[in-house]
Image (cartoon, helix red, strand yellow):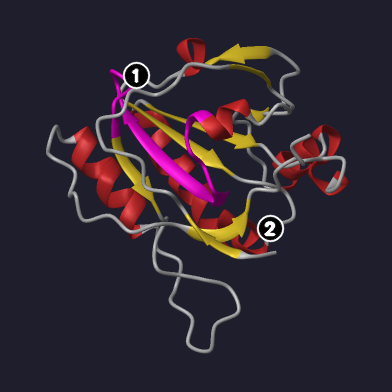
Amino acid sequence: MALTPSNMINLGTVAPDFTLPDTVSKKILSLGEIKGEKATVMMFICNHCPYVIHVMPEIVRIITEYRSKGVTFIAISSNDIEKYPQDGQEKMKEFMAEWKLDIPYLFDESQSVAKAYDAACTPDFYIFSEDLKLKYRGRLDESRPRVEHPQPLTGKDLRGALNAILANQMVSEIQFPSMGCNIKWKEQL
């Protein structure tokens, strides 16, 4: 697993549409159907990444705090499940149950959605405004697993962007890449 930063696509980018299966509800969902009233947080995650596991307690807190404010949260896994079966659909459903989350956890089997968003790592965070324009991309906060002097989980970067959007203020353009495991891409034939 290579430590990989997010690609930091251009702010203002319109969210590429998609239709993917949700491993939680077993429904096929499109972005248009599930986008948030005020903001949409998209998280590229996977079940086994130590960086994802490290931030999950704060993700749960943020979802609990912001969902009632018109923010929708969408998790997407794009890993190659042939080489990483622990990221398969049944395991994805178990992962959501373990964290007691009922947000969509979408499976991007073709990896086309990850490519459309230029996602590079897990976790990789994107926040889109109500009109699906990118306002934030990057890290949750400064905390990382397995470092000598760990920073506490605060979610300050993600929370700061959400608070600005909800207050109709500009989101700071000073944004830092997320860092995590690289997305496990399928071999191109």
Please provide the residue range marked out in magenta.
116-134
Q: Point out the image quarter for the C terminus.
A: top right
Q: Residue at x 74, y 47 (%)?
A: 98
Label at residue 67: none
Left or right: 178 in relation to 10: right
Q: Point out the image quarter for the N terminus.
A: bottom right
**Closer to the camera in the image, 169 or 3:** 3
Q: Residue at x 45, y 57 (%)?
A: 178
Please state which amino acid type lies under the numbered disc 2. Cys
Q: Residue at x 60, y 62 (%)?
A: 51
Please state which amino acid type lies under the numbered disc 1. Glu
User: Dot 2, how many residues are within 10 Å of its Cα: few (below 14), some (14-19), or many (20+)?
Assistant: some
Question: Where does residue 88 sit, x and y in percent of width and height?
Answer: 82, 38
Question: Where does residue 28 sit, x and y in percent of width and height?
Answer: 68, 12
Residue at the far front in the pictured view = 189
- Return the residue at label 2: 49
Left or right: 29 in relation to 188: left
Instruction: Classify mark 2: helix, strand or loop.
Output: loop
Q: Looking at the picture, does residue 6 appear above or below residue 93?
A: below
Q: Residue at x 34, y 19 (%)?
A: 37
Residue at the far bottom in the pictured view = 148
Q: Is residue 127 magenta?
A: yes
C-alpha separation, residue under disc 2 versus residue under disc 1: 30 Å
- Return the residue at label 1: 37
Left or right: 1 in relation to 138: right
Q: Looking at the picture, does residue 53 appear above or below residue 30?
A: below
Left or right: 13 in relation to 118: left
